Image: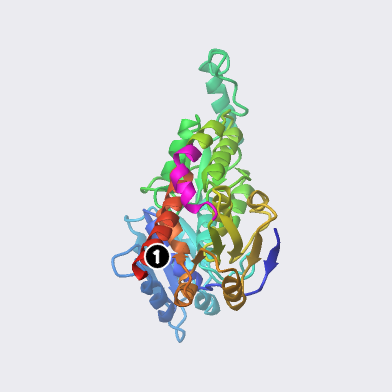
Amino acid sequence: MTILNESGIPDVLHPLHAVNGLAGTLPGTLVIVVGMRSEAHVVRSFPGGGPGGRVLFAVLDPQDPPQQGQLANLAVDAAGRRAQTVLIVGSRTATALGVDVDFEARLAARKSGLAVAAVDADTPYANPGTLSTDLEDRVLAALVDLCPKRRTSELVEAASQAKRGGFFGLGGRNRERPAEPGRPVVLLGGALSPGSAAGLVAELSRTGVEAAGVVPSAGGDDLPPVGEGTVVAVMDPNLGAAANAARERGARVVRTLMPIGVDGTARFLQDVAEDAGARTSEVMRARSVWEELGALRNRVRGKRIFFAGDTGYEVPLARFLADAGAVVLEVGAPRLDRRFLAEELQALGSGVDVVVAPDWRGQMARIEDSNPDVVVASAGLHAPLVARGHLCRGSQDFVRAGLHGYEGARRILELLARTFERAEALDTLSL
């Protein structure tokens, strides 16, 4: 596998693009965007940005910048009793006008007693470039910082209670002693895939592991404890900053495959369960799922797929489809954290080229030369590729369908199978 960097600009978006999607996945959280009217318009332009949502705007006047503490008072008044958590998102113009959103958040928290976090969209990101996933990563990192801390003393007490309850002595021969009793599992991510977290929680429960919670929390639940003794399982390859925030709190972040595809889900469940102190094997379960997916697997076997790069999920998606028998020609990635995705890159193998920040002109030329059976592309490349006669599938279609877990593997294959069936039906009509 060759990893190239073409220094292109694939779908570079303002980070505020993600505000509405995040607000929809943070029940009980009031999001306040601080910026100019133009930035408020950007947020409103995307789905969910209309009146009545969980997003409010603090519109700044460059001729009369707000005084220190004014934004904190606004946040406290706006939250009232209708929010458990307040998230203040500062735009680039807010920084330029001297608004310190971190200070305002701390002040609002002291005045209200609520959990208040701040995200400055103008802060340089750990990896170069500006993508719509930046804000999601930063928001989840802020939420991790708001989670209660789990202390070593709590773990000792949990172990003591387990011993008093016969957990070690009276559990029978088939119930082995856990490596460290009281290790809770927290799932991190899954905001863009409805039902993803719920499905993985159920699968973990089947292996004997109970999840303590999910960040972002679902249904208005309180944020789970994250700290020393916590096992954090990351579901999204774009969450490097959030994973680091959990690690800095003393949590153990599981380094394994993303729970995408059959083998990825099996490896994820097994490694998370092991870190939580449970003994399990997913080999038979994975083999059974592969057999159930046999007919769908036959529809993609031998198909040549080109990933143009858009969502950041391309590497685990390509790894799964290669396992299913497809021929992956190239994987475009808008950004690639090699350390964070080391397991994925190793599983993908050396026969697939990964192009970081692909230049769209060179990518179009390579697509023309290789003539793949299907191109997984962003909205920006979809129309010109179709106009040139290529079969395309939108990269966001996979995310919206739900990628995670064994059922996510089925949905991925079903989506591609329908794509090929419709193309074949159209070819028949043209004859």
Provide the residue span drawn in magenta. 289-302
Q: Nearer the viewer, residue 419 or 339?
A: 419
Q: Nearer the viewer, residue 409 or 44?
A: 409
Above or below residue 328? Residue 222 is above
Above or below residue 98? Residue 56 is above
Residue 272 falls in image quadrant: top right
The residue that label 1 is drawn on is 20
Q: Report the number of numbered marks.
A: 1
Q: Is residue 244 left or right of residue 172?
A: right
Q: Residue at x 53, y 31 (%)?
A: 284
Residue 136 visible (yes or no): yes
Counting from the top left corner in percent of width and height, residue 99 is at: 51, 73
Counting from the top left corner in percent of width and height, residue 317 is at: 54, 54
Residue 336 falls in image quadrant: bottom right
Counting from the top left corner in percent of width and height, residue 91 is at: 50, 73
Q: Nearer the viewer, residue 389 or 21?
A: 389
Q: Residue at x 40, y 60 (%)?
A: 23
Asked whether residue 291 is drawn in magenta, I would say yes
Residue 231 falls in image quadrant: top right
State which quarter of the image contains the C terminus: bottom left
Above or below residue 272? Residue 44 is below
The colour scheme of the drawn protein is rainbow
Label 1, residues with CA under 10 Å away: few <14, some 14-19, many ≥20 = many
Tag 1: residue type? Asn
Counting from the top left corner in percent of width and height, residue 325 is at: 56, 50
Q: Residue at x 60, y 33 (%)?
A: 274
Query: Which residue extends farthest front?
Result: 431
Magenta: main secondary structure equals helix
Q: Is residue 261 left or right of residue 177?
A: left
> Which secondary structure lies at badge 1?
helix
Residue 216 visible (yes or no): no
